[in-house]
Image: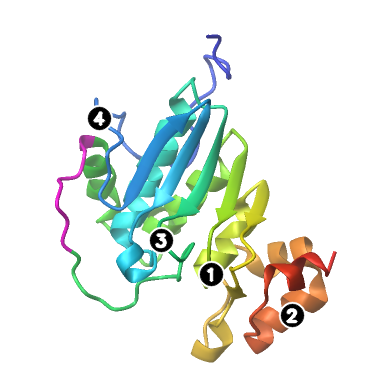
Amino acid sequence: MPKDRSDVEGPRLPWRRFPAPVPSTPIFRTVKYEVQDGVAIITRNRPDVLNAVNFQVHCDMIAAFEEAENDERVLCAVLIGAGRYFCSGADVTGKQAKYDIDDPPRVQQIKAVLSKYDPYDANTWSDVNMYDAWINFSKPLVMAVNGPAIGEGFTTLMLGDIIYSAASAFFWTPFARFGVVPEITSSITLAQRVGPAVASEMVLFSKKKTPEDVSSSF
């Protein structure tokens, strides 16, 4: 199969921030990775905490999208959530999660870099590196919203090329309740996707929206 990029093109962000990958396997602690008919299906797999996102998810997701980026069988990727929720946002419980398997070598490499956190250098932030993996993914990225999407679980949808949603989902950006700003450029991209009126209601008033509410704003 012909390559989908030039040989002179270097690694995209965030992967060029890490050492060259060692042989690894796409079997992760918090993310499921599979390829079907040219489609990489990448699943947040923490249904017990409604797919809340932590450092482990960030590192697994970076490695999973690198796998999809470099796999010539993959023509596009679909991001979905396991269980009832697409994503309930950041895991703010502070609890140390336990896992049944070890990290594959590539995730170990990624963790070794991102564990050296510098609050003044966003290049070292694990969440920013995960967002960069989606922003710089060279193939179409489909967000398949199987259930509620809250906080960063919603704002990251704006990084997808196409968004599909189950009717049972709802969207919620509770940032104003906590006195924090919307992340991942969503103060701009949300208005671009749903219009300034709906975006303002969601961000300023923390108003929940259904897929029907959002689609009717177009």
**Magenta span main SS:** loop
- 91 part of magenta stretch: no
* Image quadrant assignment for residue 119: bottom left
Front label number (3 vs 4):
3
The alpha-carbon separation of the residues under discs 1 and 3 comes to 11 Å
CB atoms at circles 3 and 4 under 8 Å apart? no
The alpha-carbon separation of the residues under discs 2 and 3 comes to 30 Å
Disc 3 marks which amino acid?
A: Gly
Q: Which residue is mark 4?
A: 24
Front label number (1 vs 3):
3
The one nearer the camera, 45 or 63, is 45
Front label number (2 vs 3):
3
Q: Which residue is mark 1?
A: 148
Lower position in the chain sequence, tag 3 or tag 4: 4
Q: Which residue is mark 2?
A: 200
Lower position in the chain sequence, tag 1 or tag 2: 1
Q: Which residue is mark 3?
A: 83
Q: What segment is highlighted magenta in the picture? A: 98-105
Disc 1 marks which amino acid?
A: Pro
Q: Residue at x 54, y 14 (%)?
A: 3
